[in-house]
């Protein structure tokens, strides 16, 4: 193994989670003994106790009607909301400090307060805090699901999983369930941060994708349970309407949802004209959630609203930022203006993207992702895909593979690094053909590069094209004879080909240049043909003694 290598309508079907199985395996469950795996979380195969179901239903009913009762009036969050409206700057500062200290244990209190009577400004500030907390919890869930996927893979290794592996799987599973339970407390308020998290954080892990889809299906089920038939959009409270706008089906599928989108866009535009920083930020996020409807409403507002108190230049700036999917919290003061984006040539657009990426880092991944697909200039599309790859976003690798052409006769250093990183991503995801295609294209543009030949050697070795793997790795060694990882991978290739003498010599060269990982060497299946050889055992002893 490589070591250290560098009869229902479409709308009705969409909104019925039962039509897709209602679980993370999208309708398909994998049996494991007495448990059922549903995308990483366990459900009992026994029928639920009717009495327990009644208790759960009553508890949910109590939580649903909780807003408006004493808790909402007396909670610390409600007091913070009240203090945020104070005319005393010191009181407001203390309230903001208290709000900043809230963590995920305050999700229910924030939800209850937001469902009550709160001023527009306080609501915007509280929603910003709740969104930030839920976004952090979603990142925690991604990490937990990734750990579970790794732990589950260990238990499936032949011949039989160890007790330690099974215990690790259960620990990881429990962590996933715990985070999901905490997220469930937020109700429909989870919808906007989930939509933005999905756009912001790409993933190549299928289990993470299924977990996110399960969360969306649960939110849709909440909508169905609360409104078997959607009420008029004007009758839906504004905080709830904002949540629904993050769950919209495609425009034109359902007139009721189209009305919700239209009403949401109108309210968001009104918030843009409030001249309050928090309300404006909330409105811009809201309009991003609205997708096509938000873009259309913003364009109309920017071009034909002479009575608007917002200057035309600012309206144009916000309209372009929405179209480019620049998150609302990025560069609130528009210090890097994109108002004239459509008038810029390709070179200037590339430079501006580099500025945005340099200043805001991974926050601009939604912008890079959409421009990598939609910009009319291929050089801009390629640069966006490269920047995504450099930021570690798996969408960059997929987009580079889809484009797979480089217009310049010479590839810039940044492009080289991005393509190498993308090839590693594709290789680790199991797309060996895709990784090879990227590397072959790169090798035609850049000659005599040790890392490129090394990467080609690792990919072709995994494809079991051992003759080419050995050739590529030997070229890499000739270009950089001091890289221990190249020597090690060459040892693996020779061992797989059956030449134990050359494999041992390459392993000695790896050790000469600093390699000493005895545990990895002992467990590496690629070196199986060397097991039992006295010379191999001596090398292991030398590593352990170093």
Image (cartoon, rainbow, N blue to C red):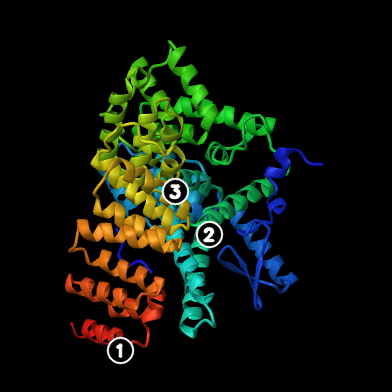
Q: Which of the 4 image quadrants contains residue 307?
A: top left
* Residue at image mark 3: 202
Side (left or right) of 237 relative to 444: right
Of marks 1 and 2, the one in the foreground: 1
Asked whether the residues under the numbered discs 1 and 2 touch, taking CB atoms below 8 Å apart as contact, a structural biologist would say: no
> Where the N terminus falls, by quadrant?
bottom left
Name the quarter where the C terminus is drawn.
bottom left
Q: Nearer the viewer, residue 42 or 162?
A: 162
Q: Position of residue 154 (x, y in %)?
A: 48, 74
Q: Disc 2 marks which residue?
A: 207
Could you tell me if residue 108 is visible in this image? Answer: yes
- Left or right relative to 71: residue 409: left
- Rounded to the nearest angstrom, the CA distance separating label 3 from label 2 is 13 Å
**Secondary structure type for disc 1:** helix
- Depth check: give the residue in front, 512 or 366: 512
Tell which of 328 and 321 is nearer to you.
321
**Residue 382, image x and y in percent?**
37, 35
Residue 195 vertical position relative to residue 173 in the rendered view, above or below: above
**Residue 508, image x, y percentages:** 22, 76
């Amino acid at each position: 193994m490589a070591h250290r290598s560098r009869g229902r309508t479409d709308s009705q079907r969409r909104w019925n989670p039962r039509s897709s199985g209602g679980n993370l395996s999208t309708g398909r469950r994998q049996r494991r003994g007495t448990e059922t795996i549903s995308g990483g979380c366990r459900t009992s195969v026994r029928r639920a106790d009717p009495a327990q179901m009644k208790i759960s239903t009553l508890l949910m009913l109590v939580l649903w009607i909780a807003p408006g009762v004493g808790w909402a009036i007396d909670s610390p969050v409600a007091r913070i909301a009240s203090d945020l409206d104070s005319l005393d700057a010191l009181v407001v500062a203390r309230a903001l400090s208290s709000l900043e200290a809230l963590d995920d244990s305050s999700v229910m209190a924030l939800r209850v307060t937001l469902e009550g009577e709160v001023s527009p400004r306080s609501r915007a500030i509280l929603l910003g805090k709740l969104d930030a907390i839920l976004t952090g919890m979603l990142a925690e869930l991604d990490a937990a699901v990734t750990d579970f996927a790794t732990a589950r893979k260990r238990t499936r290794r032949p011949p039989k999983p160890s007790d330690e592996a099974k215990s690790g799987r259960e620990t990881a599973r429990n962590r996933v369930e715990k985070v999901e339970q905490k997220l469930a407390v937020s109700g429909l308020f989870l919808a906007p941060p989930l939509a933005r998290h999905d756009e912001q954080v790409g993933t190549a892990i299928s289990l993470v994708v299924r977990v996110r889809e399960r969360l969306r299906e649960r939110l849709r089920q909440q909508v169905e349970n609360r409104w078997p038939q959607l009420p008029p959009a004007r009758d839906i409270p504004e905080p709830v309407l904002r949540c629904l706008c993050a769950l919209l089906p495609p425009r034109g599928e359902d007139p009721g949802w189209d009305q919700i989108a239209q009403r949401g866009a109108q309210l968001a535009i009104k918030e843009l004209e409030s001249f309050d920083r928090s309300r404006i930020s909330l409105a811009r996020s809201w309009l991003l959630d609205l997708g096509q409807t938000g873009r259309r409403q913003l364009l109309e507002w920017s071009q034909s609203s002479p009575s608007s108190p917002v200057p035309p230049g600012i309206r144009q700036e916000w309209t372009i930022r929405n179209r480019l999917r620049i998150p609302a919290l990025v560069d609130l003061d528009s210090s890097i203006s994109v108002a004239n984006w459509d008038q810029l040539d390709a070179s200037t657009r590339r430079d501006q993207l580099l500025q945005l990426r340099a200043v805001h880092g991974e926050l601009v991944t939604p912008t890079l992702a959409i421009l990598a697909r939609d910009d009319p200039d291929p050089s801009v599309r390629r640069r966006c895909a490269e920047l995504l790859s450099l930021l570690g976003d798996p969408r960059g690798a997929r987009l580079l593979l889809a484009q797979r052409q480089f217009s310049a006769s010479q590839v810039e250093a940044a492009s080289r690094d991005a393509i190498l990183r993308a090839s590693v991503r594709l290789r680790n995801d199991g797309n060996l053909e895709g990784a090879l295609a990227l590397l072959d294209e790169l090798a035609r543009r850049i000659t005599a590069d040790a890392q490129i030949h090394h990467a080609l050697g690792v990919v072709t070795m995994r494809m079991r094209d051992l003759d080419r793997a050995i050739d590529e790795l030997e070229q890499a060694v000739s270009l950089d004879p001091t890289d221990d990882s190249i020597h090690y991978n060459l040892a693996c290739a020779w061992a797989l080909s059956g030449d134990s003498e050359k494999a041992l010599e390459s392993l000695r060269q790896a050790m000469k240049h600093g390699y000493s990982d005895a545990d990895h060497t002992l467990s590496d299946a690629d070196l199986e043909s060397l097991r039992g050889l006295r010379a191999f055992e001596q090398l292991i002893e030398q590593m352990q003694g170093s």
